[in-house]
């Protein structure tokens, strides 16, 4: 799965959404392909991936077949994609996957397993209390988990920095062993594909 494959998949979803073929919300990626492909070079088959409502790229890069993923999206599950056979789990609840990912990492450590957990979140989620608690707990207990903060400067059409009255996000300039931060610009709105669709 290369950069063009990812972009083409999202463009198909955008087209189907704008044509009202998808009867539920979608959250689309664009502009972060190099970053996320680079991250997935370190994600193995046995590792767990947890995501928020924007997870099409993660599913594809974790090995979920495009046709299987497409069917789930057309069935209205775009913002809650879960493929346990591929160890990928997503939730539409803000911060919802964070404590689940920490619990999974805690269990992995207790079992002495070689698995690792990768937990993706957006910039606004990274500023919530649950994110700070999960990162602190995982760091202090040396859990096998990496948190990835994807900053597209959007959160339900609001700017994260403006909301919190900050110039720099909490983890933006920090170097931590279990946190990866990257920033990208997308051509899509926070939700949908740019055309009003009535469900």
Image: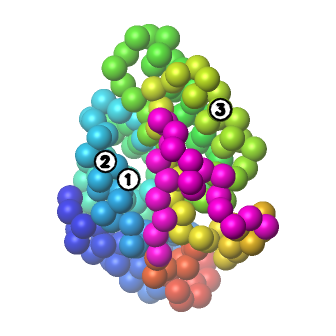
User: Which residue lies under the disc numbered 1?
Assistant: 58
Labels 1 and 3 touching (C-beta < 8 A)? no
Q: Which residues are magenta?
A: 165-185
Mark drawn on residue 136: 3
The crowding category of the residue bearing disc 3, from other C-alpha atoms within 10 Å (few below 14, some 14 to 19, many at least 20), is: few
Question: Tag on residue 40?
Answer: 2
Q: CA distance from mark 2 to mark 3?
A: 24 Å
Which mark lies nearer to you, 1 or 3? 3
Q: Is residue 154 magenta?
A: no
Residue drawn at x 58%, y 42% is: 97
Q: How many numbered marks does the figure carry?
A: 3
Mark 3, secondary structure of its residue: helix
Answer whether residue 29 is visible to the viewer in this image.
Answer: yes
Q: Quadrant of the C terminus?
A: bottom right
| Distance between the alpha carbons at the discs numbered 1 and 3 | 24 Å
Looking at the image, residue 165 sits to the left or right of residue 99; the answer is right
Q: Is residue 12 left or right of residue 174?
A: left
Contact? badges 2 and 1 (CB < 8 Å) = yes
Is residue 193 positioned above or below 25 on the image?
below
Nearer to me, 71 or 9: 9
Task: Measuring from the top left, give residue 190's x and y in whole percent.
Answer: 58, 73
Mark 2 neighbour density, 10 Å: few (under 14) some (14–19) many (20 or more): few
* Nearest the eye: 119 or 64: 119
Mark 2 and mark 3 lie on one chain; the one further toward the N terminus is 2
Mark with earlier residue (1, 3)? 1
State the residue in front, 119 or 35: 35
Depicted 132 relative to depicted 58: above or below: above
| Residue at screen point 78% across, 63% down | 164
Element type where label 1 sits in the image: helix
Q: What secondary structure prevails in the magenta region?
A: loop
Q: Quadrant of residue 115?
A: top left
């Amino acid at each position: 799965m290369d950069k063009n494959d990812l972009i083409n998949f999202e463009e198909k979803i955008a087209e189907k959404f704008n044509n009202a073929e998808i009867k539920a919300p979608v959250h689309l990626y664009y502009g972060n392909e190099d970053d996320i492909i680079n991250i997935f070079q370190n994600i193995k088959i046995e590792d767990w991936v947890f995501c928020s409502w924007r997870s099409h790229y993660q599913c594809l890069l974790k090995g979920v077949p495009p046709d299987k993923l497409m069917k789930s999206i057309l069935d209205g599950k775009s913002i809650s994609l879960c493929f346990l056979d591929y160890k990928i789990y997503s939730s539409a609840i803000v911060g919802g996957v964070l404590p689940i990912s920490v619990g999974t990492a805690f269990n992995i450590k207790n079992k002495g397993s070689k698995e690792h957990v990768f937990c993706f979140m957006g910039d606004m989620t990274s500023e919530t209390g649950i994110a700070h608690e999960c990162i602190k707990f995982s760091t202090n207990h040396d859990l096998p988990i990496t948190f990835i903060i994807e900053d597209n400067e959007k959160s339900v059409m609001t700017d994260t920095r403006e909301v919190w009255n900050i110039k720099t996000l909490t983890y933006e300039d920090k170097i931590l062993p279990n946190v990866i931060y990257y920033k990208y610009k997308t051509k899509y709105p926070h939700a949908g594909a740019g055309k009003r669709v009535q469900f």
